[in-house]
Amino acid sequence: MLKVRADRVGRCFQIRNRQGGRDVLSVLDDFNLDIREGEFISLLGPSGCGKSTFLNILAGLDDFDQGSILVDSERLKKRNFDRGMVFQSYALLPWRTVLQNLEIGLEIRRMPRRERRETAQRYLQLVGLSAFAHQYPHQLSGGMRQRVAIARVLAYRPNLLLMDEPFAALDAQTRESLQIELLRIWEADKKTIVFVTHSIDEAIILSDRVAIMTARPGRVKKIIDINLPRPRSEDIRNSLEFARIRQAVWLLIRDEVGKTEQSQRIRA
């Protein structure tokens, strides 16, 4: 069953040129992607190829200029309670405790106070941070703050979870630890996840499929099935199959990275 169908989606922006006039920058063009119900799919491509733009469109934070997007067989709506977004930055309110941060979305949904508190506590336990419920964000490590951000979105109970490089700002050890933590959480309820990343290893270890994108304007160049057994652990990184998939993905994306670098040199 399809969760999302993007058909010939295009997105352009007006940018200022060196002469003081305006040029049209095409970020997405003829972008086509089907996302299955309950799958974990990653978007992987060079910088500026439109990965985050597409995610923002799905989240209702941006518009598209052409094509169509269906979610649950209905036209994409600008505002919808069924989608949740995790950003690269933690976006936690510093004056609210961890538990109070988790309750934000539930307050928007006008959930009764007692139910709201019980729901927030349950999802805080899910990410292993119950002991920090009454701490403030500045008292937590970066990895813990990102776990709070993930728990806050999960508590909101979206049907579609959108994640824009949520681990990019973390150190390597914390990043790998949270990748496994995210897989554990995903295995528990199998929400549909669309995950944006620049890391080939991260895309492979997390995903059912990886959509390789071209250099700007972004299109789907190829979709790679990640036929690694689940549930996955750190050990999977050392397998021959992981290495084989990684090499195949790199060969697909290498030319697109080169095109992006060449375009940047020309602009400079």
Image (tube, rainbow, N blue to C red):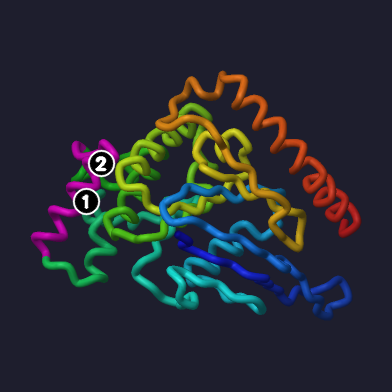
Q: Position of residue 41 (x, y in %)?
A: 53, 49
User: Mark 2: which amino acid?
Assistant: Leu
Residue 68 % position (x, y): 59, 75
Q: Quadrant of the N terminus?
A: bottom left
- Label whose residue precedes the other's in the sequence (1 or 2): 1
User: Could you say which disc has been placed on residue 99 in the image?
Assistant: 1
Closest to the observer, 83 or 245:
245
Which quadrant of the structure image shows residue 32?
A: bottom right
- For numbered disc 2, what is the local secondary structure? helix
The question of residue 128 being in magenta is answered with yes
Q: Whole-Å distance between the Cαs marked 1 and 2?
A: 13 Å
Is the residue 49 above or below the residue 80 in the image? above
Residue 268 x %, y %: 87, 56
Q: Outermost residue, front direction?
A: 1
The vertical placement of 136 against 70, above or below, is above
Quadrant of residue 155 within the rendered picture: bottom left
- Residue at the extreme right: 266
Residue plotted at (38% across, 73% down): 80
Q: Residue at x 22, y 56 (%)?
A: 100
Say the numbered circle drawn on residue 157: none
Element assignment for label 1: helix
**Residue shown at 28%/64% (left/top)?**
105
**Residue 28 inside the magenta-drawn segment:** no
Query: Magenta residues, as a range?
Result: 113-131
Q: Closer to the observer: label 1 or label 2?
A: 2
Kindly identify the residue that appears in the image at 36 percent across and 54 percent down: 92
State the residue position of label 2: 126
Q: Main structural element of the magenta stretch: helix, strand or loop?
A: helix
The type of residue carrying mark 1 is: Leu
Comparing 175 with 221, the one in front is 221
